[in-house]
Image (spheres, rainbow, N blue to C red):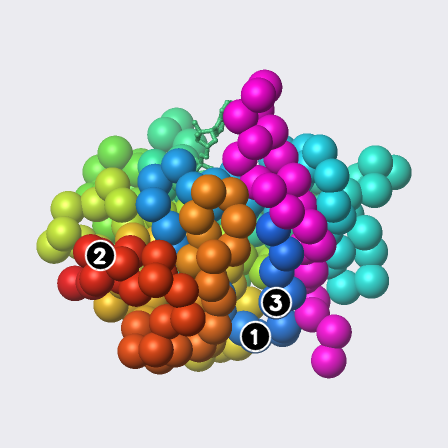
Amino acid sequence: MAGMLRADAVRKSFGANEVLKGISLDVAQGEVVCLIGASGSGKSTFLRCLNLLEQVDDGDIWLDDVEITDPQVDADDVRQRVGIVFQAYNLFPHLSVLSNVCLGPVKALGRARSEVEVEAMGLLDRIGLSAKAKSYPDALSGGQQQRVALVRAIAMRPQILLLDEITSALDPMLVGEVLDVIRDLRRDGMTIIMATHEMTFAREISDRMVFMADGQVEESGPPEQLFTAPQSARTAEFLARHRG
Ligand code: ADP
Ligand code: MG
């Protein structure tokens, strides 16, 4: 089966700094792919290209049978179908938790507020935060805020979810509750590409891990292959240094 998302030889430079040197990746429906690699290896840039937050210099990206890197394609439409959650909680501070979750579906998708609220309350209930619906983000812990950020992305019913180091800024005590939400999403069949430093979690959750180095895919495969029988010495060395 052809992948639902396919990047083919994607290149991206910032000035003279070539950050992505021909990255290809094919992700099937329901697959969970973890991007790992040293800081600066291009993980965030690649995710941002997949969401059209960065324009690629060369190569192309397909979502189902649409080439989304075609300049004719409506980037807002693509961003609604490709959800993204970042490291820093980016909830709107002046909106309640419930309004944060409802804003996108109401404003961008034009759905009825009343119907969206019911769905949002259901989603908040699933992450144990329905009692916080009327609270403002600053009344929540970092872990709670990240769980709301995940629910807010899900409320848009994206086809695929990109997660960029979403536990990196959290107190270690709060990481587990965010990872639990990702486990739930996987169980529901959500297609996910996540950049992470949580190697133990990546090994557990991913169908495939992609090790990026110097703007290229150094190695990719099932987690057990990377952890127990890496093909590349660089992969072995990276994982030896970063395993939990
Ligand atoms: P990672 O997420 O793997 O840490 P990034 O994609 O954030 O890597 O960064 C890869 C490289 O691209 C780094 O050298 C970084 O400084 C550079 N970079 C990222 N975004 C920009 C930008 N907007 N302008 C200039 N350089 C950038
Ligand atoms: Mg990054």
* The C terminus: image quadrant: bottom left
Q: Which residue is mark 3?
A: 27
- Quarter of image, res 75: top right
Callout 3 amino acid: Val
User: Closer to the camera, 67 or 148?
Assistant: 67
Q: Residue at x 69, y 50 (%)?
A: 9
Which residues fall within the magenta stretch?
1-22
Q: CA distance from mark 3 to mark 2?
A: 25 Å
The tag on residue 242 is 2
Q: Residue at x 43, y 58 (%)?
A: 211
Callout 2 amino acid: His
Q: Residue at x 68, y 55 (%)?
A: 7
Question: Is there CB contact under 8 Å for labels 3 and 1?
Answer: no
User: CB at mark 3 closer than 8 A to ligand 1?
Assistant: no
Q: Which residue is mark 1?
A: 30
Residue found at the very far right of the displayed protein: 72
The tag on residue 18 is none
> Of helix, strand and loop, which one carries label 2?
helix
Q: Residue at x 39, y 27 (%)?
A: 94
Specify whether residue 95 is in view: no
Q: Is residue 136 magenta?
A: no
Examine the rendered structure and indicate whether residue 128 appears above or below residue 173.
below
User: Closer to the camera, 128 or 115?
Assistant: 128
Q: CA distance from mark 1 to mark 2?
A: 27 Å
Between disc 1 and disc 2, whose residue precedes?
A: 1
* The N terminus: image quadrant: bottom right
Q: Is residue 12 magenta?
A: yes
Left or right of 92, for residue 189: right
